[in-house]
Amino acid sequence: MLQTVHLNLPSPFPAKILRLPPTTPLSSLLPEWTTTETTYIRTNSSSRSLPLDASIESLRYDESPDYPITLHVCARLLGGKGGFGSQLRAAGGRMSSGKATNMDSCRDLSGRRLGTIKEAQRQADLLESAPALRAKLQAEEKSKLEALERKLGIAPIENDTDAEGSSSSSKRKIVEDVDLEALAAKKHKFEDNKFLEESREINDNVRSAVSKAMLLKKKKNIVTAKSTEDASKGKEKIEQVTKKEKEKMAMPPPALTNVA
């Protein structure tokens, strides 16, 4: 019983339909113009080359032995030095490291942009933390005021309550009771070094800016004066040349004498 074989040759050669005995080896299917070093045979389901000493009977389907067998005669390609996989992995690593991580312009399932959602969440967090920030600022201002009062010798009122619940008089001085004249007569040392450094730096910057502007203005005036002087000299030279030309044109021609 003969077996039907569909043999596909490399382009541009046409395909062949053969009816061969099942014991025919695969090596006999190769065309005469090919060799085993330049071509190989494979099936539709596999890209690996088949052994050429195998027979067609070994390629039959168990469920339907009479089903045609399709074979492909493919050309062999010369291999390279290798290392292509490592190059691909390195390129993939560089591409993945350069991917953009900003997804604010993307939208969620409801159609809202992710950047809008993040901004709304940030505003909500700020509103929630506003009382705590306000309390912190008030505490800082209060501590600064207390430190200033301690330096000036002024302290806030502290009322003590006795056992019966009645309030006692203040143990510290009240702001109104402070002698302002005596307080003004005291010598206070200014110890804010940061303020002094900043003021000195600002003065130096202002002086350098003013001197630079004056220098630029002086240079500009010198250049303007020089250009004006050059223009006036050129104008005088042109006037002199024009005057000489006019005098030359106004002179009468020399008289001609008859030679006998």
Image: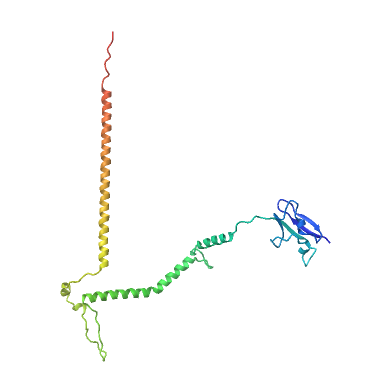
Observer-nearest of 21 and 16: 21
Residue 9 x/y as whole percent: 73, 54
Residue 24: horizontal and vertical position, in percent? 79, 59
Q: Nearer the viewer, residue 181 or 47?
A: 47
* View extreme (right): residue: 1
Residue 20 placement, left or right of 241? right
Task: Give the quarter of the figure containing the N terminus.
Answer: bottom right
Q: Is residue 205 above or below residue 228?
A: below
Image side of residue 32 versus residue 213, left or right: right
The quarter of the displayed image where residue 148 is located: bottom left
Residue extending farthest top: 260
Residue 188, x across and y down, in percent: 19, 71
What colouring style does the render use?
A: rainbow
Figure disc tally: 0
* x and y percentages locating residue 49 in the rendered image: 70, 60
Quadrant (top left, top right, bottom left, bottom right) of the C terminus: top left
**Which sits in the foreground, 89 or 15?**
89
Which residue: 26% across, 31% down?
239
Q: Residue at x 27, y 47 (%)?
A: 219
- The quadrant holding residue 242 is top left
